[in-house]
Image (cartoon, grey):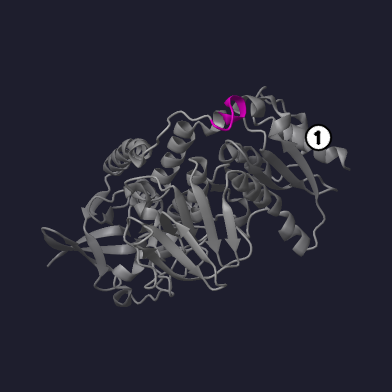
Amino acid sequence: MEANEYDLVVIGSGPAGQKGAICAAKMRKKVAIIDRKKTIGGVCVHTGTIPSKTLREAVLYLSGFRQRTFYGRGYVLKDRIAMADLTFRAQSVMLREVEVIKAQLRRNYVTTFEGNAHFIDPNTIEVKADDGSQLVRGHYVLIACGTRPAHSADIPIDGKRIFDSDQVHTLEEVPRDLVIVGAGIIGLEYASMFAALGVKVTLLDQRPILLDFVDREIVESLCFQLRQLGTVFRLGEKVVSVGFDEARDRVFAKLESGKNVHGQGLLYTIGRQANSDLLNLEAAGIAADGRGKLKVNEHFQTTVPHIYAAGDVIGFPALASTSMEQGRLASCHMFGTPGKMPPNLIPYGIYTIPEISMVGLTEEQLTQDKIPYEVGLARYAELAKGQMLGDDQGLLKLIFDPTSLKLLGVHVIGDRAAEIVHIGQVVLTLGASIEYFRDAVFNYPTLAEAYKVAALDGLNKL
């Protein structure tokens, strides 16, 4: 079987693969991208980012959550919200995203192969489809195969009562009470969505601290707001077994401490497993870790120099936004225009309800490194726009150097946090001081005005 020759072969069409392929195509390289049938756009479009964030918007709209400050805690837009009501919007957005991605790849003359990829040798990949298989050869290869929910042999996932994050969208009904095993980003995002719908959520995690890379004050605010919605936290608790009680028609989780937790459904979100185990990596001379993650250098090269990897398959932070940039930078390095991603300037968006976003350093990191800092705060309750939106719990925090006034970190919890964090990101990237916020004129009323309020608060402390 003769192989088609390409400058770059990309495995996976999620954010990393897509942007890597298009970047190389813009440099006039011959590029092929491989993905499994009907999964163009990867996990991001089909089961992860796009559906979960669209589901969140549907929850906020149909539950009337944002209007409750004005119309009372009992206000809802629709009395009985079914899963079909919530997933309807997601289907529409997903279909549109797939079309946008396909058009973008076509426009840049990227050849698309649908099928399962696996290595024959370090440069040759076999693509197996329903109608046969073919070989493609790449001078360079970019592995961007993404991840899937990690499963345990002890957890009997059936997709109905006991399910993972990929299966949330296929549920037939919204459970009355839900047990969530795993309080990482995904677990917390779904916990807050279901809690906003009035579901009684119990969150289990064997770690005693949630989101250890996020500012503590922000995490405490999130926990407080989730508790206000009736969420129960059981931290430092290890799940021993999970099962279904036929007589009571209930799912149960048995904990090492002897407790039993019951619910109508159980969501299992204990990390992600990389799809690299499907690629026959041995033939390429690459080894993955226990979760299938690949080790790369600062240019995203694996131990085989012409094979690069980017996106969720290389691990933390595993965000769509960082994956896009990793894919682009991998292609840039391959074809002679290397760039770098400064690690402390990457913004994080956590789409809980309320939303969290951050960029730069935390108080905890600065304290650990014995670096002096000061803090400026702006509460949404002080902002006219915060009052209009009905968010009186939101908070924006600026961390800065008390001598030079240089901005060190921005941390936001509240409505549109992931949007407004970028204002701080620009100032941080330019190495500027918080005097910029004091002197700038912000539109009024806006949430962006929080930067001025926080800067003035910080300067008043000096």
Instruction: Give amino acid for label 1.
Output: Leu
The residue stretch that appears in magenta? 68-74
- Nearer to us in this view, 266 or 381: 266
Residue 333 seen from this side? no
Give residue 187's position: percent from left, percent from top: 49, 55
Q: Is residue 269 above or below residue 433?
A: below
Give residue 272's position: percent from left, percent from top: 43, 63
Q: Residues within 10 Å of mark 1 (few under 14, many from 20)?
A: some
Residue, disc 1: 456
**Residue beneath the point at 61% across and 48% down:** 227
Q: Is residue 196 above or below residue 330?
A: above
In the rendered structure, the answer to whether residue 75 lies left or right of residue 311 reads right
**Residue beneath the point at 52% across and 61% down:** 316
Give residue 207's position: percent from left, percent from top: 59, 66
- Nearer to us in this view, 173 or 434: 173
**Residue beneath the point at 26% across and 68% down:** 118
Residue 371 among those drawn in magenta:
no
Residue 372 seen from this side? yes
Helix, strand or loop at disc 1? helix
